[in-house]
Amino acid sequence: MLTSVFTLFLLGLPLILLDRAPEDPPTIYLIGIWLPVAILVLSALFAIRGFVIEGDRLLVLRPLWKTRLSLQGLQQAEADPEAMQGSIRTFGNGGLFGFIGLFRNKKLGRYRAFATDEKNAVVLRFATHTLVITPDRPQRAVTLLNREG
């Protein structure tokens, strides 16, 4: 829902500005037209398309590349639909095409997230860090990850 609303806004604003643009618009006006489009495109490039477990690696599928994360040292994987509640983003994207980056909350402390649907959260605990992903089938992911770890 959040992504849909912001996408409409980021596409609608430039269209409105283009429709009302003066004949020779100032630079700031042109920035107002193109900046929302740039934000939308850049955010879409970092969107999460899915996850794949490949040996001792977790692949986060993106539109143009894969982010490879080591599963070595994985201590436990558990499904927790409330894992991300009360989180504060410390670095990253907090809602447009996903929750991607570094976050903090009371339950998990500092963690890295590759999330699109918080209710599908799977928490991966390592000795040195915590990772949250949101696969379509959380229980299946937990079974596979605990087998790998």
Image: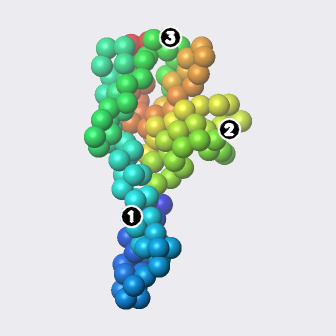
Check the picture and name the quadrant holding the C terminus: top left
Pinpoint residue 101: horizontal percent, then vertical percent: 53, 39
Compute the Cα span from label 1 to label 2.
32 Å
Q: How far is mark 2 from mark 3, CA to CA?
A: 23 Å
Specify which label sits upstream in the sequence, 1 or 3. Answer: 1
Give the secondary structure at mark 2.
strand
Any part of residue 44 in sight: yes
Tell me the kind of residue under disc 2: Asn
The local crowd at label 1, few if under 14, some if 14 to 19, many if 20 or more residues have their Cα within 10 Å, is some
Instruction: Give the residue displayed 40% in from the left and 67% down from the top.
Output: 34
Of circles 1 and 2, which is in front? 1
Q: Say which element carries label 3.
A: loop
Q: Which residue is mark 1?
A: 37
Q: Secondary structure at mark 1?
A: helix
First of labels 1, 2 by sequence position:
1
- Report the residue marked by disc 3: 73
- What's the residue at 34%, 27% (across, down)? 59
Residue highlighted by disc 2: 105
Residue 138: x, y in percent?
Answer: 41, 33
Q: Amino acid at mark 1?
A: Val
Gap between marks 1 and 3 measured at Cα? 41 Å
How far from the left and from the top, in percent, is residue 27?
Answer: 47, 73
Identify the residue at the far right of this view. Answer: 106
